[in-house]
Amino acid sequence: MAIPTPVNGMITDAVTQSSVAVLGSAPAQAMGNVYQAAAHSLSVLFQNSVQAQQHAAISAQAATNQGVMQLYSVPPMASAMSTAKIAQSNEPDFMMALLMALAASKK
């Protein structure tokens, strides 16, 4: 105890120890807050990623639905003519070559 005061020495010692305990635990509490904030940010990141995947899946389903609707709305003779034109062109060969090159690059 430093200087004699009118307050009981045990009280001043208790207050001093309490202040030291607060100062000693402050870095641990600060790091706990940092870890908690980082975990929260990471969870929001994952939630946004899942939501983006869900929106992409919905968009893909809508695009597929539109394509099927367009295929069914074309008259049969027009679709037969377009199929014949595609079969006579070299587009299928070109597309197959692209798919084979893509498959070879993944190995």
Image: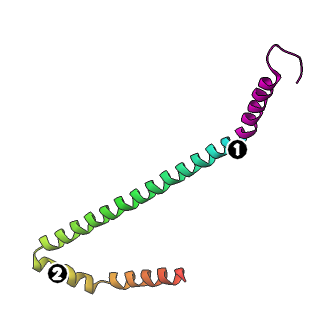
Q: Circle 1 — which element?
A: helix
- In the picture, the quarter occupied by the N terminus is top right
Q: Nearer the viewer, residue 16 or 92?
A: 16
Question: Which of these two is toward me, 12 or 67?
Answer: 12
Q: Nearer the viewer, residue 90 or 97?
A: 97
Which disc is residue 28 wearing? 1
Amino acid on which the number 1 mark rests in the picture: Ala
Residue 30 percent location from the top left of the image: 67, 41
Percent position (x, y) of residue 41?
53, 49
Residue under label 2, please give it: 81
Q: Is residue 7 above or below residue 52?
A: above
Residue bounds of the magenta highlight: 1-26
Q: What type of secondary structure mainly makes up the magenta span? A: helix
Give the image location of residue 68, x and y in percent: 20, 71
How is colour applied across the structure in the image? Answer: rainbow
Q: Secondary structure under badge 2?
A: helix
Front label number (1 vs 2): 1
Q: Residue at x 43, y 80 (%)?
A: 98
Spatial CA span between label 1 and label 2: 75 Å
The reply, left or right, for residue 23 in relation to residue 96 is right
Horizontal and vertical percent for residue 42? 54, 53
- Residue 16, quarter of the rendered image: top right
Q: Quadrant of the C terminus?
A: bottom right
- Is mark 1 in CB contact (under 8 Å) with mark 2? no
| Crowdedness near tag 1: few (<14), some (14–19) or many (≥20) residues, C-alpha within 10 Å | few
Rendered residue at 37%/85% (across/down): 93
Residue 83 in the figure: left or right of residue 21: left
Pointer 2: residues within 10 angstroms few (<14), some, or many (20+)? few
78 left or right of 33 in image: left
Mark 1 vs 2, N-terminal side? 1
